[in-house]
C-alpha cells in the first residue's frame, strides 16, 4: 500500500518541478540532446570530447564557425513551465570580443515564431539579447559594460541564470551575481533601460548550447554538467 501511495505521489508531481541533469558520462544521447541550427549551418560542429571535462571524462565540444551560418547548437526541450533555472559548466578557448556572438539560444514563444532569447557577448562582456527588438541586457553603455563581466578562458566556469515566469532575469558567474545581467520588476537597474522598455515576459520552449557569430568570430566551447530546473541548482 505504501509503495502504491508513493508511486501515485510521483505521478502527481507537476511537470514544472522536473529537472534535467547531464554530464555526458554515458556518451552523447543525440535523441535527448539533438543539434539545432536555425535556417542554415555551414562550418559548425558538435562532438563528444574526452580531452576536456569538468567532472568525469566527457564533455560536449562545439566548434563554431564564423558568420551566422557557422552556427551550431545542441540542447533540450525539457524546460519547466514556470521559472527556468539553468546551470552549465563552460570552458572557452577564446575571449569574447567586441563582436556580437551567442553561446546559449532559447526559442521564445513570447517574442513570436522563430525568435530567440539569447545569451552571449559583445563589447567583450556577457549579455542577454532579445532577438525581436535586438535589445541587450545590460545596455551597452560604458556603465552597462562595467556592470557585466568577461568570460574567462582556458578553465571551467560555472554559469547560471534564471528566466522567471514574471519576466525577471538573474545571472551568476561562479556563484557571483552579475548585476548588469539582472532585471527584476520593482528593483532598480540603471543599466537595463533598453531591456525594460518591452513588456515581453519570455516563455522559452528549449535551451540550446553552442555558438553563433554575427561577424567573423570563431570559437571553441565545451559544456559539461548541465542542469535545467524549476529551482536554482547552484555550482556544487
Image: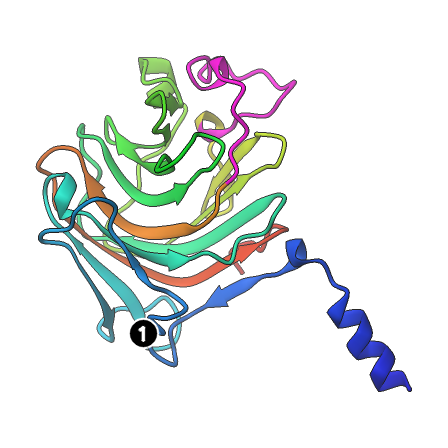
Could you tell me which residue is drawn at 59 percent across and 25 percent down?
Answer: 184
- Residue 196 is inside the magenta segment: yes
Magenta extent: 181-203
- Position of 121 compared to 9: left or right? left
Could you tell me which residue is drawn at 44 percent across and 16 percent down?
Answer: 191
The residue beneath circle 1 is 58
Q: Looking at this view, is 165 or 151 the one in front?
A: 165
Residue 208 rendering spot, x and y as whole percentages = 36, 52
Q: Is 133 placed above or below 17 here?
A: above
Q: Residue furthest right?
A: 1
Q: Quadrant of residue 188?
A: top right
Residue 186 rendering spot, x and y as whole percentages = 65, 18
Could you tell me which residue is drawn at 33 percent across and 73 percent down?
Answer: 28
Q: Quadrant of residue 144?
A: top left
- Per the picture, the main secondary structure of the magenta-coloured stretch is loop
Q: Residue furthest front?
A: 113
For disc 1, the neighbor class at 10 Å (few under 14, some 14 to 19, many from 20) is: many
Q: Looking at this view, is 25 or 166 the one in front?
A: 166
- Residue 62 is inside the magenta segment: no
Q: On the rendered image, what quadrant is the N terminus found in?
A: bottom right
Residue 204 rendering spot, x and y as whole percentages = 48, 42
Q: Is 157 placed above or below 4 here?
A: above
Q: Which color scheme is applied?
A: rainbow
Could you tell me which residue is drawn at 33 percent across and 52 percent down?
Answer: 209
Residue 141 rendering spot, x and y as whole percentages = 32, 13
Total labels drawn: 1
Q: Looking at this view, is 22 or 93 the one in front?
A: 22
Q: Quadrant of residue 220?
A: bottom left
Task: State the SS at label 1.
Answer: loop
Q: Is 55 placed above or below 46 here?
A: below
Q: On the rendered image, what quadrant is the C terminus found in?
A: bottom right
Amino acid at each position: 500500500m505504501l509503495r502504491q501511495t508513493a508511486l501515485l505521489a510521483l505521478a502527481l508531481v507537476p511537470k514544472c518541478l522536473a529537472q534535467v541533469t547531464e554530464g555526458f558520462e554515458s556518451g552523447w544521447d543525440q535523441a535527448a540532446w539533438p543539434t539545432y541550427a536555425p535556417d542554415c549551418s555551414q562550418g559548425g560542429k558538435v562532438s563528444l570530447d574526452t580531452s576536456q571535462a569538468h567532472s568525469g571524462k566527457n564533455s560536449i565540444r562545439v566548434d563554431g564557425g564564423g558568420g551566422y551560418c557557422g552556427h551550431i547548437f545542441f540542447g533540450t526541450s525539457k524546460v519547466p513551465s514556470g521559472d527556468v533555472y539553468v546551470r552549465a559548466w563552460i570552458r572557452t578557448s577564446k575571449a569574447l570580443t567586441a563582436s556580437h556572438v551567442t553561446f546559449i539560444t532559447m526559442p521564445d514563444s513570447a517574442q513570436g515564431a522563430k525568435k530567440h532569447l539569447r545569451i552571449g557577448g559583445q563589447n567583450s562582456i556577457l549579455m542577454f539579447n532579445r532577438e525581436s527588438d535586438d535589445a541587450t541586457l545590460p545596455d551597452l553603455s560604458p556603465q552597462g559594460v562595467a556592470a557585466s563581466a568577461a568570460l574567462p578562458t582556458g578553465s571551467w566556469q560555472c554559469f547560471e541564470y534564471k528566466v522567471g515566469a514574471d519576466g525577471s532575469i538573474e545571472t551568476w558567474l561562479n556563484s557571483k551575481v552579475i548585476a548588469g545581467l539582472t532585471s527584476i520588476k520593482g528593483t532598480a537597474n540603471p543599466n537595463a533601460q533598453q531591456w525594460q522598455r518591452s513588456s515581453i515576459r519570455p516563455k522559452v520552449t528549449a535551451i540550446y548550447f553552442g555558438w553563433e557569430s554575427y561577424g567573423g568570430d570563431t570559437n571553441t566551447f565545451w559544456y559539461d554538467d548541465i542542469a535545467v530546473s524549476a529551482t536554482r541548482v547552484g555550482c556544487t
